[in-house]
Image (spheres, rainbow, N blue to C red):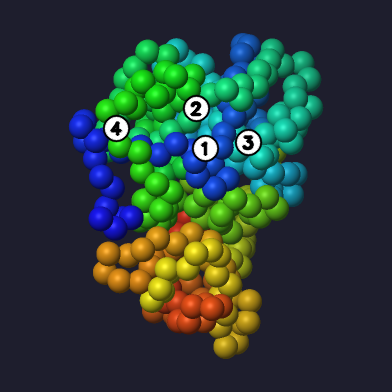
Amino acid sequence: MTPLQSSAGPQGLTYVRLAALPHGRRILLRLSGSDVRRFLQGILSADVEAARPGYALPAAILTVKGKLVTEAIVLACADGALHLALPAEAADEAIALLDRHIIMDDVALERADDVEFAMIWPEPIAGAGIECLETLYPGPGWLVFGAPAAVAAALANATEANSTTWDARRIEAAAPAWGREITAGTFPPEVGFVAAVSYDKGCFMGQEPLARIHARGQVNRVLVRVHAGTCPEGPVELAAPERPQAGRADTWAPDPSGGASGLAIVHRSAAAPGTVLEGAGIGPVEVRSGPLGDDPGVKGRK
């Protein structure tokens, strides 16, 4: 069985524990108080007002210059509460930033490190002590979280996948990952993360620079799918004859048709299907898509 072929458990379900993935460990930030929704709406890039119970949505915490401090997953729980799942390595900075912006708001923050997060597909599950939210990020499926024992019990009849299987799923869905394609100090459109940005909801922290990009310009680097003749074990620097630093591919998974598929951040000039780049140590790497998760701009540019 190749890594692209997920085995299925007795219930036909497959899952991956986020803590088992590179940069995947999450902490839960519980928010309480009457102003939570309004507070998050003014801080996060996503349209929090549109969050519906039973769903999770991607968001970004940005600097005033519009660059990523971290990503965050907004958890719209069944009881109407809104919480955040934060990358563990960025949680301290994110929580401190959020706390600084609580001035006259009725908002309280409670950090919980003892919560298990997992992604399951192709169907949701139910169980005592867990939440199961439909989502497209960090990949397509359902985000399950709760006390570790409760999550383990709920997933008892599902089969655990490895990180390569999950990467293959992300590549197919063009879902970038924190610590891979999504990194601090980048604009969301540079890393295929425009799904985390609302251009219609009004003001939020870092909104003005993104609005200028949306209205007048475009970022120079974008997310694309790529293909190579062999599967690298780590990141690969990409070069073009006219651009020695054309990009970098951080996610790879074996392709059933041979070679490996991947996600790469490349210069926009190389973001066209059929473009061949030189991968350091692996030879030719073919671009297999146009820009993914890009900002189309107000005129819907292509």
Q: Position of residue 90 (x, y in %)?
A: 68, 39
Q: Is residue 238 visible?
A: yes
Q: Which mark is residue 9?
A: none
Q: Position of residue 221 (x, y in %)?
A: 58, 66
Q: Which mark is residue 158?
A: 4
Image quadrant where residue 122 sits: top left
C-alpha span from label 1 to label 2: 8 Å
Residue, disc 1 = 19
- State if disc 2 and disc 1 touch (CB < 8 Å): yes
Q: Is residue 113 left or right of residue 12?
A: right
C-alpha span from label 2 to label 3: 12 Å
Of all residues, the one furthest to the bottom in this rendering is 241
Specify the amino acid type for callout 4: Ala
How many residues crowd around disc 4 within 10 Å: few (fewer than 14), some, or many (20 or more)? many
Specify the amino acid type for callout 1: Ala
Q: Is residue 131 above or below residue 13?
A: above
C-alpha span from label 1 to label 4: 17 Å
First reached walking from the N terminus: tag 1 or tag 4: 1
C-alpha span from label 4 to label 3: 25 Å
- State if disc 3 and disc 2 touch (CB < 8 Å): no
First reached walking from the N terminus: tag 1 or tag 2: 1
Disc 1, SS: helix
Q: Is residue 123 left or right of residue 56?
A: left
Residue, disc 2 = 116
